[in-house]
Image: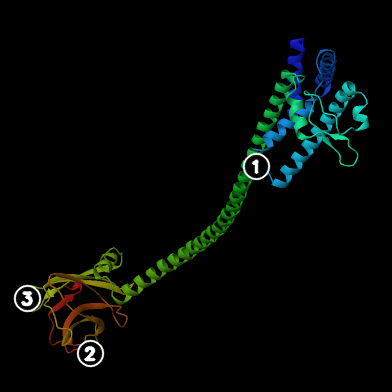
C-alpha cells in the first residue's frame, strides 16, 4: 500500500470512528480516504475486510473479558459465522477462477491445490463449505496488508481498554452511589436529631424565660415580705438605740436624766416625745435580772396622778454596759412629771407600790 500520509490519516480517523464515531467533515474525509485505499487495494493487493480482522481480534480479546458465559458463546458464534461466510465467498471466487466448472459439478474425488483452503463437503449436495481453518488461513494470507492488521488491532485494543475503563468506572460509580445513599440517610437522621434538639432548646429557653419572670415576681414578694417582717420585728422587738436617735431629733422631744436612787453607780437618760407618745431609755450599770423571777418595769407618773402611774412596759437587763430600752406606755401620758423604774415579779404588775425603785427621772424644769 502506498501514499503513507493518506494511510496514516485514514488509520487515525478509523480509530476515532471506532471509539467516538465521526460526523460532518471528518466523516466525509474518512469515506474518501477509505475509497482511495480500497481502489489501491483492488489494483495491487487483494482486499480484506477490516470488519473481519476486527471481529477476529475482538473474539480473542473477549476470551480474557469477564462476562456471562451465554453472552460470550453468542458473540463467538456470530463472529465465526460472519468470518466463515466471508471466507466462503473468497474461496468460491478463487476456486472458480482456477478450476472452472469443477466446483460447480461438486466432484468428490478432486483434490484441492496445495495452496487452497481446506474444504468440507455437504453430505447431500457435495458442495464445499468454509471452516474456521479457512478463517485462520485467510487472516494469515499474505494478501492481508500488515498496516490494516495493525490499524484494526490498535482500534480493537483501544476499544477494549475503553470498555475496561468504562466498566471499572461504572462499578466505582455504583459504589459511590451506594455510599452517597448511606451518607444521605445519615444526613437525614442528623437533620432529624438536630431539629429535635433545636425544638428542645427552644422549649428550655421558653421555660427559662418563664422561670426568670417567676423568679423576679418571687423576689419582689420576698423583698416586700422582708420589709413587713422588719416592721413586725421593730414593733415586737424595737431597736432602742435607733428609736432613741430618732426621737432625740424631734422638736417635741425632751431629755430626762436618771438619778441613782440607791447609789449603785447607775446612770443614763431618756428622751420622750409627748406629742408622738414615743421615747427610749439609755441606761448604764443597772444590774442584770433573772426574767423567770423578776423583771424591770417602767412607770410614767403624771402631774397630780402619783397614785395612778401609767405602765410603760417591762424589760430585762441581760448584759453589762450601756443598754437601750424602748418605752411602751399602755395609756396616753399627756403630762408626765416623773419616770420611775421598779423591780417587779416576772411579767410585771398592774399597779406598783414602788418598794424597789432603783432609778428615778424628774422633769428637767423640776430639777
Identify the residue at image location x=45%, y=67%: 218
Residue at the farthest front position: 109
Out of 168 and 243, give the one closest to the viewer.
168
Q: Are marks 1 and 3 in contact (CB under 8 Å)?
A: no
Sequence-wise, which precedes: disc 3 or disc 2?
A: 3
The image position of residue 323, as x and y in percent, is 18, 71
Q: Is residue 325 among what the camera can see?
A: yes
220 lies left or right of 8: left
Give the Cα distance between marks 3 and 2: 25 Å
- Look at the numbered disc 3 and give the secondary structure of its residue: loop
Q: Nearer the viewer, mark 1 or mark 3?
A: 1
The image position of residue 188, as x and y in percent, is 60, 53
Out of 280 and 101, give the one closest to the viewer.
101
- Look at the numbered disc 1 and give the secondary structure of its residue: loop
150 lies left or right of 335: right
Identify the residue at image location x=28%, y=68%: 243
- For label 1, the residue is 66
The image position of residue 266, as x and y in percent, is 10, 73
Local crowd size for mark 1, using a 10 Å CA cut-off: few (<14), some (14–19), many (≥20): few
- Quadrant for the C terminus, please: bottom left
- For label 3, the residue is 264
The image position of residue 10, as x and y in percent, is 77, 17
Give the Cα distance between marks 1 and 3: 128 Å
Sequence-wise, which precedes: disc 2 or disc 1?
A: 1
- Look at the numbered disc 2 and give the secondary structure of its residue: loop
- For label 2, the residue is 351
Task: Name above or below for residue 66 compared with residue 238.
Answer: above
Task: Name above or below for residue 102 compared with residue 69.
Answer: above
Identify the residue at image location x=27%, y=70%: 239
- Residue 270, located in which quarter of the rendered image? bottom left
- Residue 121, located in which quarter of the rendered image? top right
Amino acid at each position: 500500500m502506498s501514499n503513507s500520509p493518506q494511510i496514516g490519516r485514514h488509520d487515525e480517523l478509523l480509530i476515532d470512528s471506532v471509539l467516538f464515531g465521526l460526523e460532518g467533515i471528518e466523516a466525509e474525509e474518512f469515506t474518501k480516504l477509505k475509497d482511495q485505499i480500497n481502489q489501491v487495494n483492488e489494483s495491487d493487493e487483494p482486499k480484506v475486510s477490516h470488519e473481519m480482522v476486527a471481529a477476529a481480534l475482538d473474539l480473542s480479546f473477549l476470551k480474557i473479558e469477564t462476562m456471562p458465559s451465554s453472552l460470550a458463546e453468542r458473540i463467538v458464534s456470530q463472529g465465526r459465522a460472519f468470518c466463515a461466510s466471508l471466507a466462503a465467498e473468497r474461496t468460491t471466487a478463487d476456486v472458480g477462477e482456477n478450476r472452472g466448472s469443477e466446483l460447480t459439478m461438486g466432484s468428490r474425488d478432486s483434490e484441492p491445490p496445495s495452496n487452497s483452503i481446506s474444504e468440507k463437503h455437504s453430505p447431500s449436495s457435495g458442495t464445499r463449505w468454509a471452516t474456521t481453518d479457512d478463517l485462520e488461513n485467510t487472516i494469515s494470507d499474505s494478501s492481508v496488508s500488515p498496516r490494516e492488521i495493525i490499524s484494526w488491532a490498535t482500534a480493537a485494543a483501544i476499544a477494549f481498554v475503553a470498555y475496561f475503563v468504562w466498566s471499572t468506572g461504572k462499578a466505582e460509580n455504583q459504589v459511590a452511589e451506594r455510599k452517597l445513599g448511606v451518607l444521605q440517610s445519615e444526613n437525614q437522621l442528623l437533620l432529624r436529631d438536630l431539629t429535635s434538639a433545636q425544638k428542645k432548646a427552644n422549649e428550655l429557653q421558653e421555660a427559662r424565660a418563664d422561670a426568670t419572670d417567676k423568679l423576679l415576681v418571687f423576689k419582689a414578694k420576698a423583698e416586700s415580705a422582708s420589709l413587713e417582717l422588719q416592721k413586725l420585728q421593730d414593733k415586737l422587738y424595737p431597736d432602742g438605740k435607733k428609736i432613741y436617735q430618732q426621737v432625740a431629733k424631734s422638736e417635741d422631744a425632751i431629755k430626762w436624766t436618771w438619778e441613782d436612787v440607791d447609789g449603785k453607780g447607775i446612770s443614763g437618760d431618756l428622751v420622750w416625745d409627748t406629742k408622738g407618745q414615743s421615747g427610749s431609755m439609755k441606761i448604764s450599770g443597772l444590774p442584770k435580772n433573772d426574767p423567770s423571777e423578776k423583771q424591770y418595769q417602767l412607770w410614767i407618773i403624771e402631774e397630780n396622778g402619783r397614785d395612778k402611774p401609767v405602765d410603760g412596759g417591762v424589760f430585762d437587763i441581760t448584759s453589762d454596759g450601756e443598754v437601750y430600752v424602748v418605752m411602751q406606755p399602755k395609756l396616753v401620758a399627756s403630762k408626765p412629771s416623773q419616770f420611775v423604774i421598779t423591780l417587779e415579779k416576772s411579767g410585771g404588775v398592774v399597779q406598783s407600790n414602788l418598794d424597789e425603785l432603783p432609778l428615778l427621772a424628774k422633769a428637767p424644769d423640776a430639777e
